[in-house]
Amino acid sequence: MMLAVIIIAILVVVGVGVYIITRPPPTPPPSGPQVAIKDDGTGCINNDVACEFSPFTQNATVNGPAVVWTNSGTTAAGHTVTTCDTTNGDTSAQCPNGPNATGLDSFSLSIAKGGAPISHVFTKPGIYYYYCAIHPSMHGIINVTAT
Ligand SMILES: [Cu+2]
């Protein structure tokens, strides 16, 4: 009986060791300019000021490194990073500064609650206004300059 317990204990230790040795390394955090997407988990309704892109204005350079948005909030709907332009159907509520200059990058990226970070490599210099398509009071700016 005692021998069986010892054998089982050894198998457990070996099994855990094999798991630790063979598991993939953790994904390194993305580098580049960072923007945190924050909320207080209450749904970001009624222009909730706890729901924001932080910092409001982030700087980036043309052709990288990529700007990385990380969702640290817990609102179930998640968020988007959506550029202000006619492609994305901007409105005055979403884009009080109007559409971005013609020819700038246009994109709309979704990030789920607890989801992996999203990123974009900007290809044209300029001031990019963006918003969250789910919560139109959430705004941010990326100031992209040529290298
Ligand atoms: Cu949002």
Image (cartoon, rainbow, N blue to C red):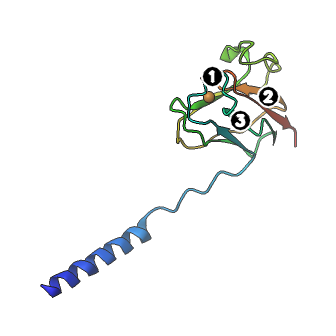
Of the two numbered discs 1 and 3 on the same chain, state the one appearing first in sequence: 3
Label 1, ligand 1: CB separation under 8 Å = yes
Identify the residue at image location x=69%, y=33%: 52
Q: Residue at x 55, y 32 (%)?
A: 78
| Left or right: where 25 falls relative to 138 | left
Q: Which residue is mark 1?
A: 133
Q: Nearer the viewer, mark 1 or mark 3?
A: 3
- Numbered disc 2: secondary structure: strand
Amino acid beneath label 3: Phe
In the depicted structure, whether residue 78 falls above or below residue 66: above
Q: At x 69% / y 22%, what residue is drawn?
A: 137
Nearest to viewer (mark 2 / mark 1): 1
Q: For mark 2, does the 10 Å Cα neighbourhood hold few (<14), some (14 to 19), or many (20 or more) residues?
A: many
Is any atom of residue 109 visible in this view? no
Tag 1: amino acid: Ala
Return the x and y of residue 113 as percentages of the image width and height: 53, 37
